[in-house]
Image (spheres, rainbow, N blue to C red):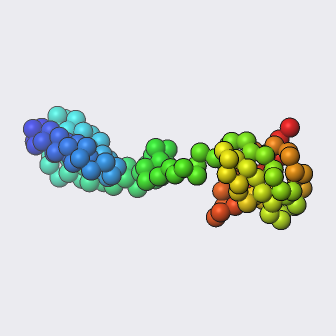
Amino acid sequence: MFWIWIGIVISLALIEILTINLTTIWFVASGLLSLILSIFIDNYLIQFGVFVIGGFLLLIFTRSYLLNKINIGVIKTNLDRVIDSVGIVTEEIKKNKPGEVKIDGKKWTAISNKDIEKGKNVLIKRIEGVKLIVEEID
């Protein structure tokens, strides 16, 4: 049974390398556990149970956490580069009423939860739709 588990682990690892979906990696881990278990226990049903149950438990409890950590599927755009950059107010921003901010030679509609006078520097916090959410800086 030892060699069968080695074959399963290698096959699943190759599938994970080729697809990069973070699905079969959990079964690689549970396959390794079953491989180690096969050294001590000859019962195939116990080994297979550990493989299936362990793989699904790892998949259910850790996949979403890791996906958030490594940001698979997040496609950064050119808009993302303006976040956390500094712009200058070219048209006064009233509390929750749009004004205008210039960043990298481009003018953007911007809103803030405070009044910001023309000529002040602002930090771009995020983008909502086509408006920048800004905060005044000194």
- Tell me where residue 11 appears, x and y as whole percent: 16, 45
For the residue pair 114 and 29, the one nearer the viewer reads as 114
- Horizontal side, residue 99 vs residue 12: left or right: right
- Tell me where residue 129 appears, x and y as whole percent: 64, 64
For residue 41, say whether it is visible. no
Name which residue lies at 69% across and 61% down.
131
For the residue pair 54 and 129, the one nearer the viewer reads as 129
For the residue pair 104 and 123, the one nearer the viewer reads as 104
Q: Which residue, as the protein is rendered here, is positioned at the far front?
A: 105
* Badge count: 0
Name which residue lies at 23% across and 42% down.
13
Quadrant where the image shows the N terminus: top left
For residue 73, say whether it is visible. yes
- Tell me where residue 9 appears, x and y as whole percent: 19, 42
Name which residue lies at 25% across and 43% down.
17
For the residue pair 34 and 98, the one nearer the viewer reads as 98
- Horizontal side, residue 111 vs residue 80: left or right: right
- Horizontal side, residue 9 vs residue 134: left or right: left
Name which residue lies at 19% across and 35% down.
40
Quadrant where the image shows the C terminus: top right
The quadrant in which residue 33 appears is top left
